Amino acid sequence: MQVSLVLENSLGPAGAPAEKVHAYPAWHRRGRRIAALPLLGALGCVLAFAYTYWFFVLTPSGQRIENNALLAGRPSTTDSIAGLLRDVDFVPVLGVTAVVLPLLALARRRYALAGGALVTLLGSLAAAQFLKLAVLPRPRLGDSDGAPGHNSFPSGHVTAAMAVLLATMLVLPRRYRWWAAIPGALGVAWVAASTVVLGWHRLSDTLGAFFLVSALCCLAITFRGQKPRRSFGAQVTALLVPVLVAGTGYLATSAGAEGGGVLVMAVVLAALSSMVMVALVTWLMLGERVQRP
């Protein structure tokens, strides 16, 4: 059938040679192309990560805003909902996740997903620690008002929570991803908000973690060899949403910096930003799909 189709289309009018038409399914010819939409999402996350670090860490005004919120969060007690985070040990959670997720992907014979899950989980944790300890300094710019001077960008707690969620979603069947994304996003939002309330991290630390993990997850999606989506609106959304999240953090905290609501603003933004980024990555996972005959 395929051979006859190729032969019939190999001759044009009057026996003249015509353009050859392959009989292979479209998904076979296009299946190994790089998916453009997640790649744009990864680029947007990198830009947002760089902007967040530049403004909140490397400028005096950014440091002043975040130091105010950080110092305001220190009186928090373990009696609050945020205080429950003190009892959470991420080490066994990460260990179990690193073993179970690849096994689940291999059981489904989705070998690329196993690699993508490990890159998202272990790559995010390694990158966060390396960037925080060896690459990204936190210079003292002006009066710190007693705020800690060591670098805490990006947050290790938030990186771990976000990485566990996105890596889990990668290996789940497509129809279950939103079911995992909704409660998972709420859990990540709680971890991010709690680190700010307890005075462990600044807002920028949580944003940096969101962008870092999302970028690696988007890269894992990019090289799964799926059909590119060509909608211009979708491409703009994938690129600009992370940048807008970073910009919103600047505008909102700047507006509340002179009043007493800077801590509340930082907590709310940490929670909302996590949910927006989880929704974006979930949409990218579901939007890239191979069309099989």
Image (cartoon, helix red, strand yellow):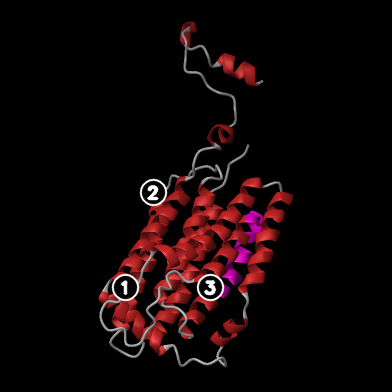
- The residue positioned 51% from the left and 11% from the top of the image is 11
Tag 2 or tag 1, which sits nearer the N-term?
A: 1
Dot 2 crowding, Cα within 10 Å, few <14, some 14–19, many 20+? few
- Front-lying residue, 102 or 146: 146
Name the residue located 63 percent from the left edge and 76 percent from the top edge: 89
- The residue that disc 3 covers is 157
Mark 1 surroundings: few (<14), some (14-19) or many (≥20) residues within 10 A? some
What's the distance in space between the residues labelled 1 and 3, CA to CA?
A: 22 Å
Q: Mark 1: which amino acid?
A: Pro
Q: Is residue 176 in the magenta section? A: yes
- Residue 226 - label: none
Single out the mark in the foreground, 3 or 2.
Answer: 3
Quick one: 23 or 207, which is closer to the camera? 207
- Which disc, if any, is residue 232? 2
Dominant SS type (magenta): helix
Looking at the rendered image, the disc whose residue lies closer to the viewer, 1 or 3, is 1
Mark 1 or 2, closer to the camera: 1
Position of 64 with respect to 37 (left or right) is left
Q: What is the three-letter code of the residue carrying label 3?
A: His
Extent of the magenta region: 171-187
Residue 230 drawn at (x, y percent): 43, 44
Circles 1, 3 touching at the beta carbon (< 8 Å): no
SS class, disc 1? loop
Residue placed at 47% from the left, 62% from the top? 130
**131, above or below 29, in the image:** below
Q: Nearer the viewer, residue 189 or 207?
A: 207
User: Which residue bears the numbered disc 1?
Assistant: 139
Dot 3 surroundings within 10 Å: few (below 14), some, or many (20 or more)? Answer: many
Percent position of residue 125, x then y? 53, 63
Which residue type does callout 2 highlight?
Phe
